[in-house]
Image: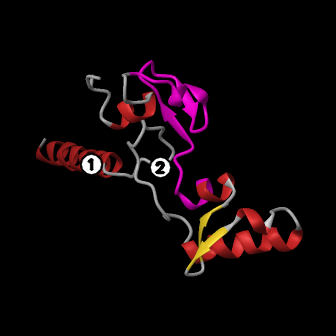
Amino acid sequence: MIRKLLCVLIGAAAFLTWGAATVSANHEGLIWGPCGQETGYLHMTPEKVRTKVDRRIRRGELDPATVLLYNEIVLSGTPHDLLIAAGVIQEYAVNRFDQVLRYDDPWWAEMRTATMTEFQVGCAGGLWIGP
């Protein structure tokens, strides 16, 4: 009887430990609201992005006149797919109607208040911010 109870307790402890580990796992792959996800050079360094931009310029895929550099870092002209791959741009976000929209969807630019776009209001937590 005690052996059976001990087995049940050990099994429950193992299950709870596994459950806690699962809950604390990262949320890679989830789609967040605007500004709900950390962005920045998370997956590639600025230097790696620069290398990829240079490669595209050499191949003729990118016009060097559209690329602006500062201290060897690309400030503008980086193709969006590289910014998404690097983690600088959150490619998809959930709007206030629980629809998943791409970052360049025109809906994000619509004015929600007199001074804020849908994206800006979403970043502010979706709270009503007066004109």
Amino acid at the residue labelled 1? Ala
Q: Residue at x 36, y 22 (%)?
A: 113
In screen coordinates, is 110 left or right of 77? Answer: left
Amino acid at the residue labelled 2? Glu
Circle 1 crowding by C-alpha within 10 Å: few under 14, some 14–19, many from 20:
few
Do the residues bearing badges 1 and 2 touch, measured as CB atoms within 8 Å? Answer: no
Which of these two is toward me, 11 or 87?
A: 87
Q: Is residue 20 magenta?
A: no
Outermost residue toward the top?
Answer: 97
Check disc 2 and report the residue beneath it: 28
Location of residue 27 with respect to 51 vertically, above or below: above
Q: Earlier along the polypeptide chain: callout 1 or callout 2?
A: 1
Q: Position of residue 14 (x, y in %)?
A: 27, 50
Which of these two is toward me, 7 or 12?
A: 12
Q: Residue at x 65, y 73 (%)?
A: 50
Location of residue 30 with respect to 112 vertically, above or below: below
- Mark number, residue 20: 1
Q: Which residues are magenta?
A: 84-112
